[in-house]
């Protein structure tokens, strides 16, 4: 297919396909939007600071740089604190860089907590490390949107915060009874239960953000999305569906070190074919092969 193209043109085409967060490589963590929150507007937003922005990225880098290296990549960060863009993205280069682009505008949004920002970092890492189902044309390196959300709470958020005092971290949160009951049912250790709750609540913050952008109904742990996808949706699911995904990822009791796979969707994850009814990818975006 490249018969009449120059080497430079072919390289340019290859680089242009190596983008995420959607199937076409045109948008980021959030659907396309024109929101912009400058550094000067920070005082009107949340409590995020540049130091905390970098601290969260540093924590993720500490855990995932060696993992990426072991897989043959070089983890690189674009820390765009001064950029008011309310989004995030991931991309790869032909020279082995696995890049994550984090923007200050998203970090400063009033609906984004510190934990929610960390979960966005995890989502972007999920495109690189989240496994199947994947998208991306001929390079096909990126986990799709739903899988990146699922990986975020299933593996990454737990990995970077498992050493925290998670009971203290959730002490002042208003936690829905459904979240508490399900996390307590799925985990025995108190810190694991608290980490499950913490991940779920970070997901609620992001679902509220996504819902506000689309002017969709408020998301709720008690009203999961009942739609059933006829085929796996690789693009951004609706806000409630994304909340359901974050919650299910938090509830899956597979250990963090049990890795996912680029080919086997059951590896390191909770699946209906294994007898799981909780912790599974929601049907609102995911079509299991057996269904």
Image (tube, rainbow, N blue to C red):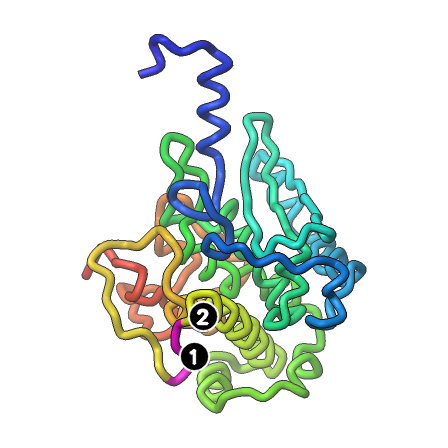
Q: Is residue 288 left or right of residue 104?
A: left
- Of all residues shown, which one is farthest toward the bottom? 177
Give the quadrant of the N terminus: top left
| Residue closer to the observer: 94 or 181 | 94
Q: Mark 2 sits on what residue?
A: 211
Q: Position of residue 39 (x, y in %)?
A: 75, 59
**Magenta span covers which residues?**
216-222
Judge the density around disc 1: few (<14), some (14-19), many (≥20) Cα neighbours within 10 Å.
few
| Residue closer to the observer: 290 or 84 | 84
Judge the density around disc 2: few (<14), some (14-19), many (≥20) Cα neighbours within 10 Å.
some
Q: Position of residue 133 (x, y in %)?
A: 36, 49
- Residue 275 occupies which quadrant of the picture? bottom left
Residue drawn at x 41%, y 60% is 269
Label drawn at residue 170: none
Question: Does the magenta run of residues contain 221?
Answer: yes
Question: Does the magenta run of residues contain 11?
Answer: no
Contact between marks 1 and 2 (CB within 8 A): the answer is: yes
Residue 208 visible to an observer of this rendering: yes
Q: Mark 1 sits on what residue?
A: 218
Q: Is residue 288 above or below residue 182?
A: above
- Residue 70 occupies which quadrant of the picture? top right
Q: Position of residue 155 (x, y in %)?
A: 53, 60
Please report whichever mark, 1 or 2, sits nearer to the chain's N-terminal start. Answer: 2
The majority secondary structure of the magenta stretch comes to loop
- The span from disc 1 to disc 2 (Cα, nearest Å) is 7 Å
Q: Position of residue 106 (x, y in %)?
A: 62, 60
Residue 253 visible to an observer of this rendering: no
Q: Secondary structure at mark 1?
A: loop
Give the quadrant of the C terminus: bottom left
């Amino acid at each position: 297919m490249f018969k009449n193209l120059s080497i430079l043109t072919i390289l340019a085409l290859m680089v242009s396909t190596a983008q995420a967060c959607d199937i076409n490589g045109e948008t980021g963590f959030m659907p396309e939007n024109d929101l912009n929150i400058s550094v000067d507007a920070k005082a009107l937003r949340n409590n995020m600071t540049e130091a905390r922005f970098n601290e969260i990225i540093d924590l993720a880098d500490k855990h995932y740089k060696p993992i990426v290296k072991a897989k043959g990549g070089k983890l690189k960060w674009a820390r765009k604190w001064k950029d008011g863009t309310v989004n995030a993205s991931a991309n790869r280069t032909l020279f082995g860089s696995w890049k994550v682009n984090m923007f200050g505008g998203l970090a400063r949004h009033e609906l984004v907590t510190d934990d929610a920002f960390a979960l966005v970092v995890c989502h972007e890492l999920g495109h690189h490390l989240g496994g199947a189902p994947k998208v991306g044309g001929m390079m096909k390196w990126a986990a799709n949107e739903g899988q990146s959300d699922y990986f975020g709470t299933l593996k990454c958020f737990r990995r970077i915060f498992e050493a925290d005092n998670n009971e203290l971290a959730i002490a002042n949160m208003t936690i829905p009874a459904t979240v508490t009951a399900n996390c307590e049912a799925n985990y025995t250790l108190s810190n694991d239960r608290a980490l499950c709750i913490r991940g779920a609540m970070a997901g609620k913050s992001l679902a509220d953000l996504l819902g506000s952008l689309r002017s969709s109904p408020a998301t709720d742990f008690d009203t999961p999305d009942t739609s059933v996808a006829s085929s796996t949706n690789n693009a951004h699911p609706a806000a409630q569906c994304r909340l359901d995904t974050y919650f299910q990822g938090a509830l899956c009791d597979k250990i963090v070190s049990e890795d996912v796979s680029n080919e086997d969707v059951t590896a390191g994850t909770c699946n209906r074919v294994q007898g799981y009814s909780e912790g599974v990818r929601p049907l609102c975006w995911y079509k299991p092969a057996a269904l």
